[in-house]
Image (cartoon, rainbow, N blue to C red):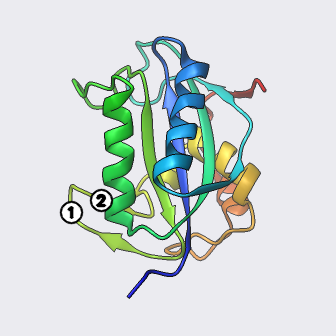
């Protein structure tokens, strides 16, 4: 029994190394291994969140049409991170590449520490909602039942997020 196609939204971030090239390479690998990249936001420069004593990030949101399950998407994203040099040393630390599974269709998934979809803190983070709203503003958050654009409008996070390309 094959899975129907699902639209999954991923947020990519990088604040070390050749940030733009790492993000472009990650998007290319996502297209090869996870599914068809159907939409991509502009690139945004964002101040670091959580641990401010580090370089700023570049962030991009992508929509991917996939037949993979959410856990398969997660495993593929983690493998791509590792291939591109990601080492997990500290929570919210600097990183070459980060690929977060933000939304998986309208699914609500709780696999404990391994995977929670929608991303449990996405609605609190400007660096997630700004690029996501660009490509998925009319998508409804499956828990809050509000469009991404509305969540962005209600956001209290004043972190600096600037479109660069």
Helix, strand, or loop for circle 1? Answer: loop
In which quadrant will I find the N terminus?
Answer: bottom left
**Residue 149 picture location, percent across and down:** 73, 59
Location of mark 1 (residue): 112
Say the numbered circle drawn on residue 38: none
Q: In the figure, is residue 72 to the left or right of 144?
A: left
With respect to residue 57, does 74 lie above or below? below
* Discs 2, 1 touching: Cβ within 8 Å: yes
The residue lying toward the viewer, choosing from 59 and 20, is 20
Point out the image quarter for the C terminus: top right
Residue displayed at 34% across by 30% down = 83
Query: Could you tell me which secondary element the residue under label 2 belongs to?
Result: loop
Determine whether, in the image, residue 11 is placed left or right of residue 155.
Answer: left
Residue 73 position within the rendered picture, expressed as x and y whole percent measured from the top left: 39, 57
Relative to residue 157, is residue 160 depicted above or below? above
Query: Residue 115 bears which disc, if any?
Result: 2
């Amino acid at each position: 029994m094959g899975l129907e196609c699902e639209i999954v939204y991923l947020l990519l971030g990088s604040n070390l190394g050749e940030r733009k090239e790492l993000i472009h390479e990650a998007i290319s690998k996502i297209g090869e291994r996870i599914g068809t990249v159907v939409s991509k936001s502009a690139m945004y420069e964002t101040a670091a969140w959580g641990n401010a004593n580090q370089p700023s990030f570049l962030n991009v949101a992508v929509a991917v049409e996939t037949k993979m399950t959410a856990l398969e998407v997660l495993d593929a994203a983690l493998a791509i991170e590792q291939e591109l040099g990601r080492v997990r040393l500290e929570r919210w630390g600097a990183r070459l590449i980060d690929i977060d599974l933000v939304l998986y269709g309208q699914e609500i998934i709780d696999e404990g520490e391994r995977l929670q979809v929608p991303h449990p803190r996405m609605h609190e983070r400007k660096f997630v909602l700004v690029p996501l709203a660009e490509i998925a503003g009319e998508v409804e958050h499956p828990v809050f039942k509000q469009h991404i654009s509305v969540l962005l409008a209600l956001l209290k996070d004043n972190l600096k997020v600037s479109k660069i390309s």
